[in-house]
Image: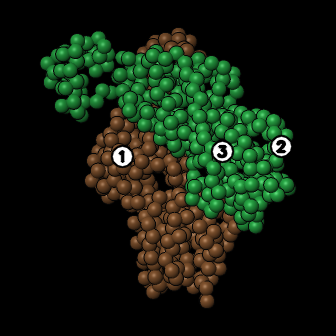
Chain colours: A brown, B green
Amino acid sequence: MSTLADVAREAGVSKATASRALMRPELVARPTLENVRAAAARLGFQPNRAARALTTGRTGMVGLVVPTLANPFFAPLVLGAQRAAEETDNHLLLTVSEYSAEREAALVARLSEQVDGVVLVAPVGSDAALRELADRRPLILVDRRVGRLPAVVLDTASGTAALVRHLLELGHRDIVYVSGPPGSWADGRRRAAMAEQIEEAGARLRVLGPLPPTFDAGIGAAAELPAGAGAVVAYNSYLALGLLHGLTAAGVRVPEDVSLAAADDLTALGATVPSVTALDVPVEEAGALAVTRLLEVRDGTRRTVRTLLPTRVHPRESTGRAPGR
Amino acid sequence: MSTLADVAREAGVSKATASRALMRPELVARPTLENVRAAAARLGFQPNRAARALTTGRTGMVGLVVPTLANPFFAPLVLGAQRAAEETDNHLLLTVSEYSAEREAALVARLSEQVDGVVLVAPVGSDAALRELADRRPLILVDRRVGRLPAVVLDTASGTAALVRHLLELGHRDIVYVSGPPGSWADGRRRAAMAEQIEEAGARLRVLGPLPPTFDAGIGAAAELPAGAGAVVAYNSYLALGLLHGLTAAGVRVPEDVSLAAADDLTALGATVPSVTALDVPVEEAGALAVTRLLEVRDGTRRTVRTLLPTRVHPRESTGRAPGR
């Protein structure tokens, strides 16, 4: 592998100049800069990141902490974040908190010494703990809002309210929300937004859960659906698939007996029989935007971020007129 | 935050001694070492990893490259790898290759300067490319074998052969394998192992796919199941769930008309109606073992690794006697 000395020789400059050109380009005249960069490219030279970190105080790494990978929500989120990091020549350091606030705090603390900033999907930690973490390094929250901390939020709250409106328009007056994940901030917002719609319409909202985002849990929810419920909204696609399976296996027809909808659209819901009404949620975009904005905060080109990404109801076959309406 | 100078002052030693104690403990007498460590602990001092990397040549980071996160296989794999890394005070740097051999090579090349070694789940890259990558840094393959390169392989090949034996014992003579992911090394091994069983028994094996590991693809496979097939083995749980949904929706009874089995057991297959026969695959263990062995190779306590982790058939309701047997 070629060294900085090789690059300096190739470019005909001193090692110090070559180093400055690669690490602090803003200090070097444009012709010199281009000369050194061309030499580095010819030699396939990659500046050692450890050395760069000591010189510039930047690691070129961005941390991403997610609560789990066993939720289809996080595959596109990670993909979006990774693409945004790579496009700006940064690396993504991904870790999993397993829905534990303690683990989350420990991970961010350990990460903060080796990354330039952290994208944190923190559904369960306390506001105070998150404020403290934000004191160490640039930090951006996803799907969580804590005071003025930078945040990118997917508006599934307005989205589930829109799903409820769609069901109310079909004549439903007895709606069940299968909630989760346990302790989730976004879920609290979804419940509040749905309750407001329901109250306005004088209808009834019952809440099951909170449950994990799994096919299994959906099968369990189907078995425990309260009598009289005419429509079910699940907060997650896999839950909805499990509900569809459990209801169908028990002889309950969707949508003739019970309407079904999901508050995200991350798996197969357009291909099932019947296809399932769902919420388009721009998860990959949220991941990419969180990284891009975080780097802007790191670079001082942006002071804070408060982005709310809209979601959209995608009506399909699984939601129909309420029985007898 | 406290600095190395603070720790040295607190311990009453020189900065050089404090540095050696924290970075190269093997060079420092035990009482001094304990003294410095206690001082560091009192002050909450965390040695800067960039500095440590320059001193020791170690980054304390392990790379993990997976082809996708949109496959339930990788959530437990990442979890196992992360736990093993953390237990040894290393960090896991996870990236996604999106099933592209080019991207895989680029990621490993970029990673290799900042990590001590790479765990690579490389289903599709060429042997030659993988050998070249292994020249740069300690590297361990998961679910792939290339000559003498270190590897941890989950024995789904013997496992799918055992699933086929289970079906043959139930009288099935016309079996379909829904294969994938596209281009996968492990899938080639599974096909070969199944074909051998089938040939011995004088039965028939037809192959669908390769298909992606999704519920959608399973629904598609159900629609394209060749006439006369009495049993289907899907390489993945979500495919099997999609197959179950598609078959049931089309009025095909499982297992009365068609038996169904899956070559992993990562989602809900014990909770469906009927429950689905599957293969127990120790995926989390594979992730943990790959990291542990990689660190042993890095530390020189192990020269190479060739581990084959056994899998086990878990018979459930979805596999029954062949019709007319």
Name the chain under label 3.
B
User: What number is the disc on residue B263?
Assistant: 3
The CA span between labels 3 and 2 is: 20 Å
Q: What whole-number distance in Å separates the C-alpha atoms at marks 2 and 1?
A: 53 Å
Q: What residue type is labelled 2?
A: Ala
Q: Quadrant of the C terminus of chain A?
A: bottom right
Pointer 2: what residue? B203
> Looking at the picture, does residue B90 appear above or below residue A271?
above
Residue mark closest to the camera, 3 vs 2: 2
In this rendered view, identify the residue nearer to me: A310 or A296. Answer: A310
Query: At which x and y percent is residue A251?
Result: 64, 74
Q: Does residue A317 appear anywhere in the picture?
A: yes
Residue depicted at 63% across the width and 34% down the height? B155
Q: Distance between the residues labelled 1 and 3?
A: 34 Å
For label 3, the SS is: loop
Sequence-first disc among 3 and 2: 2
Q: Which amino acid does label 3 sit on?
A: Ala
Residue bearing the label numbered 1 = A104
Q: In this view, does B25 lie to the left or right of B74?
A: left
Left or right of residue A165, residue B181 in this image: right
Q: Do the residues labelled 3 and 2 touch (CB within 8 Å)?
A: no
- Marks 2 & 1, CB-CB < 8 Å contact: no
Q: Which residue is drawn at 26% across and 17% down?
A: B21
Residue A217 x, y percent position in the rendering: 51, 61
Identify the residue at the far front of this view: B325
* Element marked by disc 2: loop
Asked which secondary structure carries label 1, the reply is helix
- Can you see residue A315? no
B33 sits to left or right of B91: left
Pointer 2 local density, CA inside 10 Å: few below 14, some 14–19, many at least 20: some
